[in-house]
Amino acid sequence: MLSVSAPALAAGVAAGTLIENTATATYTTGGDPETVDSNTVSILVDELLDVEVSSLDASAVPLGGGNAVLSFEVTNTGNGPEAFELTVDPALSGDDFNPAVSLVAYDSNGNDVYDSGVDTVIPTGGATPLIDADDSLRIFVVVTLAGSPADGDTGDVDLTATAATGSGPAGTVFAGAGDGGGDAVTGTTTAEDDDIGTVIAEIGVVSLVKSAEISNPNGDDEAVPGATVTFSIVASVSGTGSVDDLVVADTIPTGTTYVASSLTLDSASLTDGADADEGEASGAGIEVDLGTVAGGDSHTIEFSVTID
């Protein structure tokens, strides 16, 4: 069985313990002292089924384009080893969006951090390993974005743990199902408890602003044949999140010709060919791969054409 050390919670005498008691009487008869023992009464301690679930996250966990990990603790507050069936519900009322649950796992290496591919996954509807009385097990719920939340929206996820032996109103008896062969009896928690973890969406929103500056051989800004038009495109990301694989593209307008080697990114020249730098350009258009851009950042792309 797997158990993780935790402070004792005073669940009481361990399930399956045999409590025995024999009474003794002393007396005199005919001046002689005598002793007599009663029969021995034996009581087998039943298993108390109780559990406590607690979210371990002090605040909402950021959720962007990848995964977020919600951490919970399932504590066996009963008096015998017990497994607990886990149910996860991300579709709660009162929040802004419903995250998608990727998986549920327990901290099988005991380092308090979710390790993908290391920590043991609990299948949907599955249960924890046995948790010793008064011990705890850390549970990880991995979620991703779903729907179309706005930056700063929150989503709640509820984790419920139910004793695998059974649950019900306090005092419900499961005959012979307790550890050590006694009965199992639900305690004040009804052998079921839950708690809620919260994620907060970190969304990046892209905006593009395009402008043009004209110069011609006459030294003014009239758009006449032979004039040069320099286009400037500012790509900005707002919000607390980032965006990935951001690519800005533009076509060369009809009636104009691309000016070779005029493509720049944040004032740095880019080659026209499809090579190691971020951009490429041709008579058909330009394309610049900005990759991952964090909220609050912006990049400026410029290129020039001449009016035919």
Image (cartoon, helix red, strand yellow):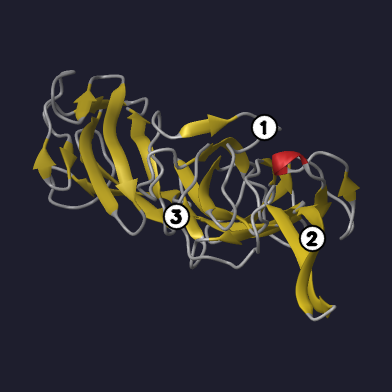
Comparing marks 1 and 3, which lies closer to the viewer? 3
Residue 187 is labelled as 2
**57 vs 86: above or below:** below
Q: CA distance from mark 1 to mark 3?
A: 23 Å
**68 vs 34: above or below:** above
Residue 126 is labelled as 1
Relative placement, left or right, of 280 versus 92 is left
Question: Which residue shows up at 67% across the image and 32% down it?
Answer: 126
Amino acid carrying mark 2 in the image? Gly
Task: State the quadrant of the C terminus.
Answer: top left
Which of these two is toward me, 166 or 153? 166
Question: Which residue shows up at 48% across the image and 52% down it?
Answer: 203
Residue 17's x, y, as percent?
67, 51
Residue 76's x, y, as percent?
62, 54
Question: Which residue shows up at 35% across the image and 31% down it?
Answer: 249
Amino acid carrying mark 1 in the image? Gly
Determine the image quadrant of residue 79. Answer: bottom right
Which of these two is toward me, 40 or 138? 40
| Element class at badge 3 | loop
Between discs 1 and 3, the one toward the N terminus: 3
Residue 10 is labelled as none
Within 10 Å of the Cα at label 3, are there few (<14), some (14-19), or many (20+) other Cα atoms? few
| Element class at badge 1 | loop
Between discs 1 and 2, the one toward the N terminus: 1
Comparing marks 1 and 2, which lies closer to the viewer? 2
Residue 5 is labelled as 3
Within 10 Å of the Cα at label 1, are there few (<14), some (14-19), or many (20+) other Cα atoms? some
Relative placement, left or right, of 240 versus 76 is left
Amino acid carrying mark 3 in the image? Ser
Please say whether residue 154 is visible from this viewpoint. Answer: no
Please say whether residue 145 is visible from this viewpoint. Answer: yes
